[in-house]
């Protein structure tokens, strides 16, 4: 049982909590608290879709489907629920810039990554790269993959 009287910093500092959620909703990795990790697949793929630039919701949904070979198909509830949380967490922001009104539906909202969103996407990519590296070392994945 986690002794809350000692303070969460104590447990992080001395390595009692590893790769588990802390009281602050963060994940401890290598004795450091890394906010936002691990990301859900939906959030991670939305961030990846926005790395290339601003997109509206439907374009994000189609991009995620394409980048995962159809294995992740987000419905509107997952997409817009994730976007709402990402906006609140400052991972993305809504843009004011709009394409030519004759080429676009004025009801569409466009989103882009924030600096924080870029850093979180990079950190999550690195976390996943390390996980794949371990899986290869343990022969879970073939080395040629």
Image (tube, rainbow, N blue to C red):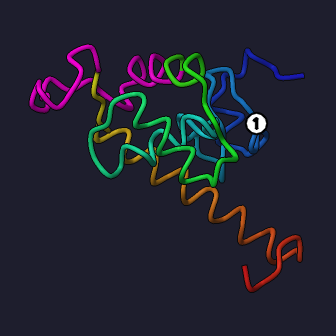
Measured as percent of width and height from the top left, residue 94 is found at 26, 23
Above or below: residue 25 compared with residue 119: above
Q: Does the magenta stretch include residue 102?
A: yes
For the point 32% across and 52% down, which residue is it?
52
Q: Residue furthest front?
A: 102
Work out whether residue 40 or residue 65 is closer to the camera in this orientation and state it. Answer: 65
Which region of the structure is painted magenta? 82-108
The number of numbered badges drawn on the structure is 1
Q: From this view, report whether residue 144 is shown above or below residue 92.
A: below
Vertical side of 16 occupied by 93: above or below? above
Q: In which quarter of the image is residue 126?
A: bottom right
Which quadrant does the N terminus fall into?
top right
Q: Does the magenta stretch include residue 57?
A: no
Residue 45 x %, y %: 53, 44
Q: Residue at x 66, y 53 (%)?
A: 30
Residue pictured at 29% horizontal, 20% vertical: 108
What residue is disc 1 on? 20
Q: Which residue is drawn at 35% across and 50% down?
A: 51
Depth check: 134 or 47 in front? Answer: 47
- Nearer the observer, 44 or 36: 44
Spot occupied by residue 137 in the image (x, y as percentages of width and height): 82, 78
Quadrant for residue 3, please give it. top right
Magenta stretch, overall SS: loop
Q: Is mark 1 on a helix, strand or loop?
A: loop
Say which quadrant the C terminus sits in: bottom right
Q: How crowded is mark 1: few (under 14 residues within 10 Å), some or many (20 or more)?
A: few
């Amino acid at each position: 049982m986690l002794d809350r009287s000692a303070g969460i910093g104590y447990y992080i500092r001395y390595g009692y909590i590893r790769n588990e959620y802390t009281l602050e909703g963060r994940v401890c990795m290598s004795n450091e608290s890394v906010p936002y990790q691990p990301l859900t697949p939906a959030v991670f793929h939305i961030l990846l879709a926005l790395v290339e630039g601003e997109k509206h919701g439907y374009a994000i949904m189609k991009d995620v489907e394409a980048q995962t070979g159809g294995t992740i198909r987000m419905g509107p509830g997952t997409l817009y629920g994730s976007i709402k949380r990402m906006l609140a967490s400052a991972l993305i922001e809504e843009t004011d810039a709009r394409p030519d009104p004759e080429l676009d539906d004025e009801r569409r909202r466009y989103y882009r990554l924030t600096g924080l969103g870029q850093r979180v996407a990079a950190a999550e990519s690195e976390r996943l790269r390390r996980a794949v590296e371990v899986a290869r070392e343990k022969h879970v994945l073939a080395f040629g993959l």
